[in-house]
Image (cartoon, rainbow, N blue to C red):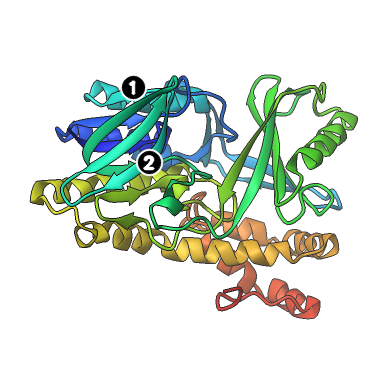
Amino acid sequence: MYDVLVVGGGPIGSHVAYKLAGMGYGVVVLERKEKLGEQVCCTGIISQECVDSFAIDNNVILRQVNSARLFPPSGRLLRLWRQETQACIVDRAAFDVAVANRAQDKGAEYILNSLVRDIERKDDTVNVEAIRLGETLNFEARAVVVATGFGSKLTKRLGLGKSRDFVMGAQAEVVTNGVDEVEVFFGQETAPGFFAWLVPTSPQRALVGLLSRRSPELYLKKFMSALLAEKKIASTEAELSYGGIPLKPLAKTYSQRLIVVGDAAGQVKPTTGGGIYYGLLCADIAANTLNRALQNDDLSAKGLASYERQWRRKLRQELKTGYYARKFYERLSDKHINRIFDIIISNGIHDTLLKAEELSFDWQGKAVLRLMGHRAISKALEMMKIPFHLGEGR
């Protein structure tokens, strides 16, 4: 019998496995894909803070980023720049493999091409049934960590519900013509309610993608055609990948002998859809909680409840502010977006925010509140009759 079975061999599940195996526990990871690092719909943008906090291997970092070019529907450029590196673009496939290798070096066992079909929790153990190459496999463990990413039916089957709000993403790798900065595009015709991106990963290569609640493939093809017309990319011929992103966390992320972490738990920034850093932070909390529970032989729901208290204490305000900012933005027309950009540029609001040292790539809540609280912005929103306050939208 294993101490902990982890469902999902992505970076979040692998980090939990790495931490627990390093503590001396018997850990097995079941991954449904045939090999680690298979195609993922993710830009791989993480903060320098994330790189430093989790000692991410430089070999998986494609490039560092300290600037971005933002385009509203009008096309008026807003460039954000800081002298210090703000983010890194990682090779997601290599990153996933590197984190899994760390876990395996500590003794974690990986079984690939294994789809978990059922999890049965008992008083003294957990039975997990998986299908691998047409064969049914059964595992026993003292506890289970669900780190499947978004879209798994396991959380609902286990009585923890499912994501109450989500968005779909579409992305492709393309050949570029001289694009050397991250570019972000806004507007209802480009990515209604969300945004599109062109992220250079290496000389003449970039990831192009967008988020949308409906028809992401159609919007992405249209966006790529526009980039081709502007000669930013060399061709629209590319293989598209797709993925769902939760915008709200599960109502509950633990139960008897069970913890849910990462995208499966909804531990994702609602503003950008980024989930790597928040997921890793919560993976640490999950591993430490399980360590105490395993030592005390108390894997009851009460014994694991501190996991949820801790991660919500750390992320609650960011997730709340980010979600209301997301819902607010979805109400804006192109005219509204252009007006807000004009005010930001004319009043130098972006420069003021960039000079504030406490504002960071990952912790965006203060920036959102400061932006919305700026006199020129709040006055404009009042005239637009689009209020922004954290008490709305429930």
Q: Is residue 285 among the parts visible in the rendering?
A: no
- The x and y percentages for residue 386 are 73, 75
Quadrant for the C terminus in the image: bottom right
Q: Quadrant of the N terminus?
A: top left
> How far across and down, in percent of the image, does residue 144 sit?
29, 43
Q: Give the mark toward the camera: 1 or 2.
A: 2
Asked whether residue 341 is in view, the answer is: yes
Is residue 198 rendered to the left or right of residue 88? right
Locate residue 57, reporting x and y percent. Answer: 39, 25
Q: Which residue is mark 2?
A: 118
State yes or no: discs 1 and 2 in contact (Cβ < 8 Å): no
Residue at horizontal 70 percent and vertical 37 percent from the top: 209
**How many other residues sit within 10 Å of disc 1, few (<14), some (14-19) or many (≥20)?**
some
| On screen, residue 391 above or below 372 | below
Q: With 325 as the anchor, is 296 left or right in this view?
A: left
x then y, percent, for residue 103: 29, 27
Query: Residue 89 falls in which quadrant of the image?
Result: top right
Q: Is residue 115 above or below residue 353?
A: above
Determine which quarter of the picture holds residue 349: bottom right
Q: Nearer the viewer, residue 361 or 218?
A: 218
Q: Is residue 282 above or below residue 53?
A: below
Q: Earlier in the sequence, mark 1 or mark 2?
A: 1
Give the residue pinned by disc 1. Answer: 101
Q: Amino acid at mark 2?
A: Asp
Q: Amino acid at mark 1?
A: Asn
120 vs 145, nearest the viewer = 120
